């Protein structure tokens, strides 16, 4: 039976306080679900730096409040709205909830596979309630089936950190043997980027800071490590590592503008910069002359569509990419945010949502 109330971490107003844990948050009944909606009983959820941006309200677009954050959830479908019509999932299915909770599937962006740019997109933990709760309403067309036998805790962060970095690498114009630079490599997105890059045969230069992140990146297959707080000249170091030419691509998951600054200088001619990290107000300066003269490609890369989610999960389920996470409880959300802000979380934190 589905309870009428639940435990949930609620942000009352953006920036006011971090999420407070409520125990009497309402759970929708089956009859209250709209067509196309499903109720999911969560097993676990990852904590993404995006949740921290949403709670702090430090982006130029605001989250709906009061809000339940979270968008890396894995759980079981326990109810489906009446009159849903064609339904790709059924009761009892184990599914994942990603940032893109729903899209119209019929606009130009959806038809072209860029569902994340749908003007009607619903965003988990931002415009609709997310996964920092025991139950969440999601949408049958966008939940992602979790491959059988793949551990839920290991799958959770593939739904955002995995999908996002997988897609950014997929469109980075690289081929096996190419060099890729990953600023932010020791974080939640970055440590998965190191591994997705390796599955593509890329040679990884990891950039981040501190002994724990260095150890993690090198153990995951990064060929070189640069500590951004210690390096005197990142461009020079990357040029030296790459035989003087520079790297073929950079996937930037750093949360600061500083992580973007030198990319155009350390990329080789024809190189590609994939912008992923989302500082709210930073801009980045790069030489227009050298961007043109070196034929540099600059792309924004925003999460992924349903197909990217299936592909990213498939690779991880087969064991080629593993999320390195510490399992905690919902009550540890605030301390997790503090850790992220201080830069002390190597890899990811996943919250256990089972009672
Ligand atoms: O679709 C998207 N584009 C998308 C999806 C999901 C998340 C974008 N994001 C955004 C988040 O909102 C956040 O801004 O990507 C960013 C990274 O998310 P995360 O991986 O969840 O954050 P983290 O675990 O805190 O990792 C960030 C890492 O960046 C390093 C930090 O040390 C940390 O390990 N870093 C920083 I801050 N400055 C750096 C620099 N100058 C740097 N690494 C290298 N150079
Ligand atoms: Zn995320």
Image (tube, rainbow, N blue to C red):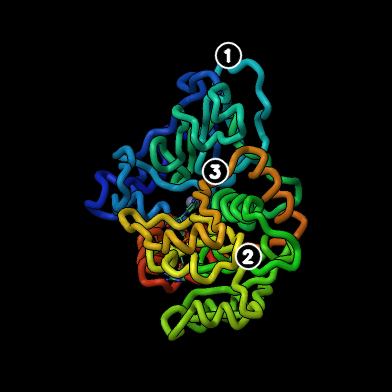
Q: Is mark 3 within 8 Å of ligand 2?
A: no
Q: Residue at x 45, y 48 (%)?
A: 70
Dot 3 corresponds to which residue?
98
Q: Residue at x 37, y 62 (%)?
A: 285
Q: Residue at x 59, y 18 (%)?
A: 84
Dot 2 corresponds to which residue?
248
Give the Cα separation between the discs numbered 2 and 3: 29 Å
Quadrant location of the N terminus in the rendered image: top right
Residue 200, given in percent of the width and then of the height, sits at 73, 60
Residue 128, given in percent of the width and then of the height, sits at 41, 35
Dot 1 corresponds to which residue?
83
Residue 8, given in percent of the width and then of the height, sits at 39, 45
User: What crowding class fits label 1: few (fewer than 14 Cα within 10 Å), some (14-19), or many (20 or more)?
Assistant: few
Residue 317 relative to residue 97: left or right: right
* Nearer to us in this view, 219 or 166: 166
Q: Quadrant of residue 189?
A: bottom right
Determine whether label 3 and label 1 are within 8 Å by CB.
no
Give the Cα separation between the discs numbered 3 and 1: 24 Å
**If you read the primary sequence from the N terminus, does the residue marked by circle 2 or circle 3 appear first?**
3
Give the Cα separation between the discs numbered 1 and 2: 50 Å
Determine whether label 1 and label 2 are within 8 Å by CB.
no
């Amino acid at each position: 039976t589905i309870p009428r109330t639940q435990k949930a971490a609620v942000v009352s107003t953006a920036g006011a306080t971090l999420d407070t844990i409520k125990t009497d948050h309402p759970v929708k009944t089956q009859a209250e679900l709209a067509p196309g909606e499903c109720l999911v009983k969560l097993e676990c959820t990852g904590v993404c730096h995006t949740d921290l941006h949403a709670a702090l309200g430090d982006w130029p677009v605001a989250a709906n409040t009061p809000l339940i954050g979270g968008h890396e959830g894995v759980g079981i479908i326990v109810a489906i709205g009446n009159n849903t019509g064609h339904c790709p999932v059924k009761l009892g299915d184990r599914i994942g909830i990603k940032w893109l909770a729903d899209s119209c599937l019929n606009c130009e962006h959806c038809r072209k596979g860029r569902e994340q740019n749908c003007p009607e997109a619903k965003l988990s933990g931002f415009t609709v309630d997310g996964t920092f709760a025991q139950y969440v309403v999601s949408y049958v067309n966008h939940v992602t089936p979790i491959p059988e036998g793949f551990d839920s805790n290991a799958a959770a962060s593939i739904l955002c950190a995995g999908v996002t970095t997988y897609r950014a690498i997929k469109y980075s114009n690289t081929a096996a043997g190419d060099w890729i630079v990953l600023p932010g490599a020791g974080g939640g997105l970055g440590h998965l980027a190191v591994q997705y890059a390796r599955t593509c045969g890329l040679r990884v230069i990891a950039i981040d800071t501190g002994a724990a992140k260095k150890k993690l990146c090198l153990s995951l297959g990064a060929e070189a490590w640069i500590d951004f707080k210690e390096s005197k000249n990142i461009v020079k170091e990357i040029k030296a590592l790459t035989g003087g030419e520079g790297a073929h691509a950079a996937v930037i998951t750093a949360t600061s503008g500083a992580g973007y600054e030198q990319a155009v200088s350390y990329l080789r001619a024809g190189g590609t910069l994939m912008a992923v990290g989302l500082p709210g107000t930073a801009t980045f300066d790069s030489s227009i002359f050298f961007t043109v003269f070196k034929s540099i490609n600059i792309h924004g890369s925003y999460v992924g569509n349903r197909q990217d989610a299936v592909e990213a999960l498939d690779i991880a389920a087969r064991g080629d990419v593993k999320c390195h996470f510490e399992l905690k409880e919902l009550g540890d959300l605030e301390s997790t945010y503090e850790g992220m802000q201080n830069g002390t979380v190597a890899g990811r934190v996943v919250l256990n949502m089972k009672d």
